Image (cartoon, coloured by chain):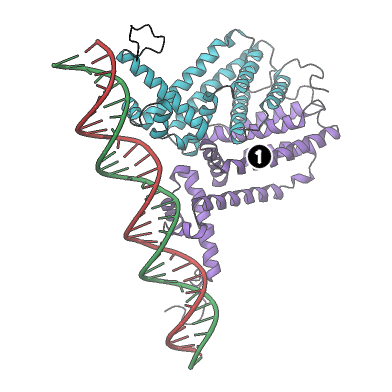
Chain colours: A cyan, B purple, C red, D green
Amino acid sequence: MSASVADLSVAPRPRLTQAERRDVSERLLVEATLAVVARRGVGAATFDAIGQAAGYSRGLATQRFGSKQGLIDAVIAYLHARRDEVMDAAHVADMEPLEAVLYYADSHLRLLDQDVSGRAYFMLMAGAVADASSLQAAFAASHERVRLWLADRVRAGQAAGQIRGGIDPDGAALMVGSLLLGVSIQWLADPATPLGLIRRTSLALLRDSLSAHPAKEPLHD
Amino acid sequence: MSASVADLSVAPRPRLTQAERRDVSERLLVEATLAVVARRGVGAATFDAIGQAAGYSRGLATQRFGSKQGLIDAVIAYLHARRDEVMDAAHVADMEPLEAVLYYADSHLRLLDQDVSGRAYFMLMAGAVADASSLQAAFAASHERVRLWLADRVRAGQAAGQIRGGIDPDGAALMVGSLLLGVSIQWLADPATPLGLIRRTSLALLRDSLSAHPAKEPLHD
DNA sequence: ACTTATTTGTTGGACGTATAGCAACAGTCT
DNA sequence: AGACTGTTGCTATACGTCCAACAAATAAGT
């Protein structure tokens, strides 16, 4: 039945290198974990559920990643890599400081419900916080990186006279980071949260309060 | 042996009414749950740990609250009651709209690390979000209440000419609520987060961007 | 007032379930 | 044939729930 003449069949070739098999299953397991977490929560992410979602047995993930912790670590690494990828692709580095800050916030809020990664990321973070787990430190470090980048942009904007001087750069960075985090969690808690509305309002208020030269009545009517 | 003369002993009288015994144990169990959650995480809040922390056996909480869910419900109710209590005591209702909004934010950020309740509240919320549990709806409803109150205050401030008219009240309320939520979660994820700094910066920026008559250079140097 | 009976509060053992980790086995590539 | 990938049955553990015994408080009877 299967390709009696030769391997002319277009179907996914049944013959893969060992390394390929390994890579494929590893990727599928990580993505299945994300899907299960996003759809049914951190607690539902058992080896059984993950293996089934990935199309494998319940035992493979243990085999691959050594332990539950190992799998989660791999998932976090995958998420961070993806985020960096998106950030780099956006060429944020070339923008004016104030615009870069606002663009970062805008991207974050626009991408939030685009695929499962955003949802899974914040559910994992919430789980780490709720259980006071060791993963907490990884998330804190990730936030720290963003915070430093934002503070740096604010300083650059102040040096260029684009952002008003009286603002504490670290405080502003912390505030922007926390706002984005808060919107994300709020959206998870209540999926009906209007992301578009909060995005527009937040960006308008941020632009207005950070800018050294606000329009006279930029928000009026 | 016990009180040969009379009941002159000052020691906590060993003889309690049945109803008293019941109330005492119930309160101790709820507070022990908060303490365990705040200190060791949602996952560590087992009947065993809670009973031990309260000074009872592991079986009592089940007897009292019927099930784990029942205990958690009681804890949530306790937290919401406490929060309302604090809010009412603050006489926020009598303040000018803009000041009320800023005062609410200020209180939230100042009280966050004052006792275990704040910490436990957000850890429970994070857990609900992470596990997509049914509790999520309760927290969402609680946030909704705050959001509606904030939006109402913004509208009142606009009507009084105190808050600038071009701002969307619902968007602003959502933004303020999310900011407070985000700071809380950020603080849980990274206890080193400088709450004082973020409090000052956030209030300054909020006041500046909401106020219809900002000082010329309120934040400068 | 004292004793006994009844109701209420508390305990700790037993049971079922869920799940991570392990080890032996089967299938697939080189 | 040998190495590697993937599966299945097993074990240990942790936890919520049920329940029967025990302790304390209240009510009833004398």
Percent position of residue A164, x then y: 70, 17
The residue closer to the viewer here, B60 or B189, is B60
Determine crowd level at label 1: few under 14, some 14-19, many 20+ residues with C-alpha closer than 10 A: some
Is D24 on the left or on the right of B165, as rendered? left
Residue B202 lies in quadrant: top right
Above/below status of C22 relative to A170: below
Q: Residue furthest right?
A: B160
Residue type, label 1: His
Q: Can residue A144 be seen in this view?
A: yes
Q: Is residue B191 visible?
A: no
The residue closer to the viewer here, B221 or A149, is A149
Percent position of residue B123, x then y: 53, 40
All told, the count of numbered labels is 1
Subunit of label 1: B
Q: Check disc 1 and report the residue beneath it.
A: B143
State the residue at coordinates (60%, 49%). B79
Above/below status of A25 relative to A58: above
State the residue at coordinates (75%, 15%). A213
Residue B162 lies in quadrant: top right
Percent position of residue B176, x then y: 68, 32
